[in-house]
Every structure is written in C-alpha cells, then in structure tokens.
Image (cartoon, helix red, strand yellow):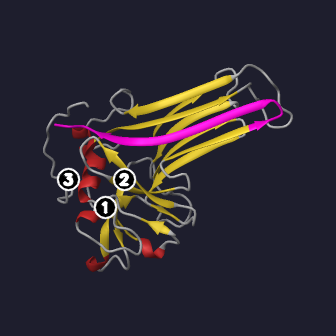
Amino acid sequence: MPTAESFTVLGGGNGFRSCLAKIDVSDRSFDKWTTLGGNQKGGAVTESGKGLAQAMQFLWNLEGFQFSASANASRATFGTDPVRGGESVSVSLTNYSTDADSSRKIVPKDRVCGSLRDLREADYDTDAPLAASAVFGFSTFNGLNELARYYNGVTSNEDNFVGYGFMLDITGTGFGQDQEIRLTSQAYRASVRVDLASGSSSTDSQYCSISSNIGLTFYFVCGEEGTSGSDSYSSGGITAQASASFSRLDFYTY
C-alpha cells in the first residue's frame, strides 16, 4: 500500500478537521443502524464499538476499496421490449484507488483543508451502453466525505453518545443524502446492488462488516445481498449474469 507523508494538524481539537454534526439516530425511522465500530441499534454500547479508530482512519487515511463487479449477457440488448439483438457483451470492474487517479487524489496531509469527494468508477459496454454495466460509487454528503457523531437520544446529553458513523441527511428536505458506498452490476434483466451504509429503514437490511489492510474491522448496514450478491436471467434465447462483491478497505500507512 502507498506510504503517506507524516503530518501534524490541530483541526477542531478533536482529531478531526472540525466539529462533527450530532445526529439522534433514534429520531430516524431506521430498522437498523450501526457505528463504524459496531455499536448497533438495540445492542450494548462499548467504548471500542464507538468506532473512533475507524472514523479517524476513514477520514484521514482511506486509500481505496477492494471489490469486484461483472456483468455479461449472451447478446446485446438495447432495450427491454422489444429486444434488439447484437453481439454478446461483458464488462467488469475491480478495485478503486484514490492514489491511481491524480485528478481525484487527495493524500492524507491535504485533507486538512480538503476532503475526498464523489468517488466513482464505471465500466459500460461501449457499443451497447444499456446492455451491461458495472458501477462503483461512494455517495457523499453535499459533495464532501463527512462523518457524524451518533446519539441514541437527544444530542444535548453526552450520555446518549454511541459513536461515529457516516453522515446522514438531517435536513428533512431531501436536499441532502445518507452517505453510502454502493456497487452495482447489471446485464439486461439480471442486476445486483451491494450497499455499505450506516443505517437503513428496510426490514430486509442486515448488519455486515468489511476487513482492512490495517487490522481494523469496519461495520455497516448492508442491503439484503450483504457484502456480495449475484443474479441471473434466462429467457427467449438470452442469458445474463451479474455479480458484485466488496472484500476489503485499504488505507495509507506511514
């Protein structure tokens, strides 16, 4: 993994660039929520589960994502009904590194005054862009990669503090968005989507975790697919397969 240049920062005096937003997760209609350290809705709150170590690493030292996504169909399909046939299509996407793209690269010391912004990578079949696609995206809150302090109750009482998680939409206007990491693949009528979030209102969601190259485990709320999923389709002479899987988070070392 890339080695970062050591640096010192005062920031907000809390280890972060500035004070973090405080969010009452009990005030959201979440079926499940979790901190990056693993404190979860309805569970006991532990100090390590608050996820300060994970939050610090995610903000300052995130380097990339290890994943795979692929989609293929027996022939190109430019629409759903009627199907217009063509050649077979196949796309794949593996891994994402902030270090590999100079236009989006923000090394740790530069995050004192900057932030990782919308990270995304995609592979489409160039001749039939609607036929197959594999897309990775890290949605950010108002264009910035931010974290928040979670409280299970009113935020004015520090006894309710349960830990750190992804930024959530606290505007109530739909202007913002809940931050999440998403991996999707699609080929004709075969599609799969894998989400890594800090909360979900869906009863089909599940708790999941991802390992890292620095020995820390990061905890999320995933969709019904968990951290990996697949789908297939076969009808009318067309076969299609799609798969997506997250395997690891990578961080700069010093």
Mark 3 or 1 closer to N-term? 3
The mark closer to the camera, 3 or 2, is 2
Q: Nearer the viewer, residue 65 or 108?
A: 65
Secondary-structure class at tag 2: loop
Task: Tell me the crowding category of disc 1: few under 14, some 14 to 19, or many 20 or more residues within 10 angstroms, Cα based.
Answer: some
Q: Quadrant of residue 106?
A: top left
- Residue to which mark 3 is pinned: 11
- What is the x, y in percent for residue 107? 27, 35
Specify start and end residues of the magenta stretch as a single range.
Answer: 234-254
Q: Main secondary structure of the magenta part?
A: strand
User: Quarter-wise, where is residue 131 in the image?
Assistant: top right
Instruction: Examine the rendered structure and indicate whether residue 142 appears above or below residue 169.
Output: above
- Mark 3 touches mark 1? (CB < 8 Å): no
- Judge by depth and name the residue closer to the eye, 249 or 243: 243
Name the mark on residue 20: 1
Q: Residue at x 80, y 24 (%)?
A: 85
Residue 151 is inside the magenta segment: no
The answer to whether marks 2 and 1 mark residues whose Cβ atoms lie closer than 8 Å is: yes
At 67% from the left and 28% from the top, the residue drawn is 129
Residue 117 visible in the displayed image: no
Which numbered disc, 2 or 1, marks the residue that appears first in the sequence?
A: 1
Q: Position of residue 234 (x, y in %)?
A: 75, 36
Amino acid type at image mark 3: Gly
Picture coordinates of residue 158, whole percent (x, y)? 26, 77
